[in-house]
Image: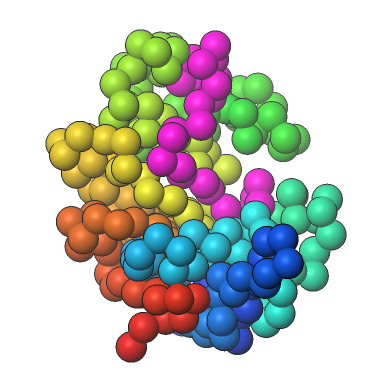
Amino acid sequence: MANDPIVQVRDLRKVFRQGDLDVIALNGVSVDIAPCEFVALMGPSGSGKSTLLHLIAGIDRPTSGTVLVQGINVAELNESQLADWRNQNVGFVFQTFNLIPVLTGFENVELPLLLTQLKRSERRRQVETALELVGLSDRMHHRPDQLSGGQQQRVAIARALVTDPALIVADEPTGNLDAKSAADVMLILQALARSSGKTVIMVTHDPKAAAYGTRSLHLEKGEIAA
């Protein structure tokens, strides 16, 4: 049903082994996230917010508990299925942009589509649409070193959007940006949830960035704080 949560996390635990020690990153986290929400995950370093983001996005696997995204139990997918699922359903935005320096903005955005069966003309149309959404149609043939930090992050957002995923996950997307560029990026992410039907989950330390979301979840020592 349309009102069902897009993300359902139940009793999620993640334990990392460091030498002879077990480090508990998440300890029994449960949360629902609705379609078109823009959720900010906040908390001190080591609180488990990035771990939670990675588990929801299928980058990592839980020690126990379940993560359902659009009804799919992500942890039950094998590596090949998981790679296909991520490419089709999740768009990633990182603090460090993760653009390939020798490729233009257009070519960076096109990369996820090279794993699909789309024709070249269809890929071009989707890339141009994504770049238009982030206001970079006039810079699509520039390489990353010819773009400002804010423009590089907008290219990264276009790359996250180009496969039309339901879920956008962003890990400190404004961490390397000045205040004006950060605000521009946050307005784009906010518009994706409000107007484009995307669900956005973002890790941030910045209360100003979190204020653009529909709600914030605060994590402390691997648990969601009341």
Q: Is residue 137 magenta?
A: no
Considering every residue shown, the one lying at the far front of the view is 20
- Residue at point 50% right, 26% down? 99
Quick one: quadrant of the C terminus? bottom left
Taking the image as shown, residue 2 lies to the left or right of residue 213, namely right
Residue 111 falls in which quadrant of the image? top right
- Residue at point 43% right, 51% down? 170
Q: Nearer the viewer, residue 142 or 57?
A: 57
Q: Nearer the viewer, residue 189 or 1?
A: 189
Residue range (magenta): 86-108
State whether residue 160 is above or below residue 145. below
Quick one: quadrant of the N terminus? bottom right
- Residue at point 23% right, 48% down? 187
Q: Nearer the viewer, residue 26 or 36?
A: 26
Indicate the position of residue 197 as horizontal and vertical percent values.
41, 60
State whether residue 124 is above or below residue 71. above
Q: Is residue 106 magenta?
A: yes
Indicate the position of residue 137 as horizontal and vertical percent values.
35, 22
State whether residue 193 is above or below residue 157. below
Taking the image as shown, residue 56 lies to the left or right of residue 203, namely right
